[in-house]
Amino acid sequence: MIAVPVKTNKENPAVAPLFGKAKWFAFIADDTTEIIKTPMQGGVEVAQWLLEKGIDTLVFAEMGATPYAIFAKNPQIKLYHAGFERILLNDLLKALKQGKLKLAEAAVMQEILAHHEGKHSHNHEGHHHGGGHHAHHHS
């Protein structure tokens, strides 16, 4: 079963940008799509809920490090990156079927987390101190 965070519970919704804030999740099994309201908020709780649902594939746009760590401990679940552009569920599923989506492995996840952290710029206190020899300049 495939799980995708979506913005609404209508036919062919847009994929929700943030995993932990998605109000709805689409569950796709055998070409049948069911959209269920997320019973909780926050990446960790949502991740646990999806594990209980027994999904084997998750497609998402953005996720924080904590829920990612939970999925990393459950290698039976394949994580795919939906990309950062707005995309509708049907287009996403088509891309998944055609093998066009990237698996969210460590390198891809670095990119996603950088993007994710970039939105929370006020969290940067204390992230980049110490060990003066690794200055990261993201131009």
Image (cartoon, grey):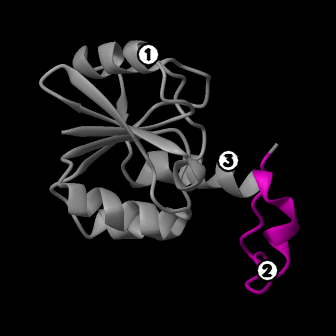
Question: Which stretch did the figure color magenta?
Answer: 119-138
Residue that badge 3 annotates: 115
Q: Determine the CA span between mark 1 and mark 3.
A: 29 Å
Tell me which numbered mark, 1 or 3, is placed earlier along the sequence. Answer: 1
Q: Quadrant of the C terminus?
A: top right
Nearer the observer: mark 1 or 3; the answer is: 1
Location of residue 92 with respect to 8 vertically, above or below? above
Where residue 33 sits, quadrant-wise, is top left
Where residue 92 sits, quadrant-wise, is top left
Front-most of 134 and 40?
A: 40
- Say which amino acid is labelled 1: Glu
Cβ–Cβ below 8 Å for labels 1 and 2?
no
Nearer the observer: mark 1 or 2; the answer is: 1
**Image coordinates for residue 96, horizontal then vertical, percent:** 30, 22
Residue 127 horizontal side relative to residue 83, left or right = right
Residue 91 horizontal side relative to residue 122, left or right = left
Query: Residue drawn 87% across and 66% down?
Result: 122
Residue that badge 1 annotates: 11
Q: Quadrant of the N terminus?
A: top left
Res. 132 mark: 2
133 is within the stretch colored magenta: yes
The crowding category of the residue bearing disc 2, from other C-alpha atoms within 10 Å (few below 14, some 14 to 19, many at least 20), is few
Front-most of 36 and 27?
A: 36
**Image coordinates for residue 119, horizontal then vertical, percent:** 78, 51
- Say which amino acid is labelled 3: His
**Image coordinates for residue 95, horizontal then vertical, percent:** 34, 16
Residue 122 horizontal side relative to residue 3, left or right = right
Tell me which numbered mark, 2 or 3, is placed earlier along the sequence. Answer: 3
